Amino acid sequence: MLRLVAILSSALWLSGCFIAEEIRKGDALIEQHSVGWREKKKGIEQAKAEDAKAEAEAQSQKAQNRGPGVPDQLADWWQETVEKEPVKANRDDKLVSCVVGGKTKFVRESDCKIRRGRASQLKASSKSSATAPSKPKPGA
């Protein structure tokens, strides 16, 4: 019984390959004898060649960095990033200790979230350094 199933499945699989091969051969014959298909194929090849040529020109232009208006674009970028007024911090955003990549940094909570760090609130101490009594100097 198992042999019969194996023989039937291989026969079906091989017949499927035979059918696909015959379809490919038929498509090749149609391409050879069809005038409209040859013209369409020529048009497709010409369009591909033009696209490849345009892409190559664009790549060479980009490589030379001589595109239209590059100095103007750089000046606009410089003005946006450097010369504009810096972003004002939100007053509700508290300072936290942020662990990013094994290093602890003290940043605002929103910055820690952006960097995907682990934030922990800073604890306020009861004594501040401004009001702590200073130790007497030796010999005074």
Image (cartoon, rainbow, N blue to C red):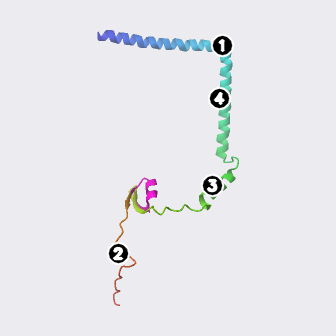
Where residue 95 appears, as percent x and y from the top left, is: 43, 63
Q: CA distance from mark 1 to mark 2?
A: 94 Å
Label 4 residue SS: helix
Neighbor class of circle 1 (other Cα within 10 Å; few <14, some 14-19, many 20+) is few
Query: What residue is disc 3 on?
Result: 77
| Residue highlighted by disc 1 | 34
Q: CA distance from mark 2 to mark 3?
A: 47 Å
The residue under label 2 is: 127
Q: Secondary structure at mark 2?
A: loop
> What is the secondary structure assignment of the residue under circle 1?
loop
Residue 34 locus on image (x, y percent): 65, 13
The mark that comes first in sequence, 1 or 2, is 1
Q: Quadrant of residue 99?
A: bottom left
- In front: mark 2 or mark 3? 2
User: Alpha carbon of mark 2 to alpha carbon of mark 4: how far?
Assistant: 76 Å
Which of the numbered marks, if any, corresponds to residue 48?
Answer: 4
Boundaries of the magenta span: 104-118
Q: In front of the other: label 4 or label 3?
A: 3
Residue 99 is tagged as: none
Q: Establish if 60 lies above or below 100.
A: above
- Name the one closer to the observer, 17 or 125: 125
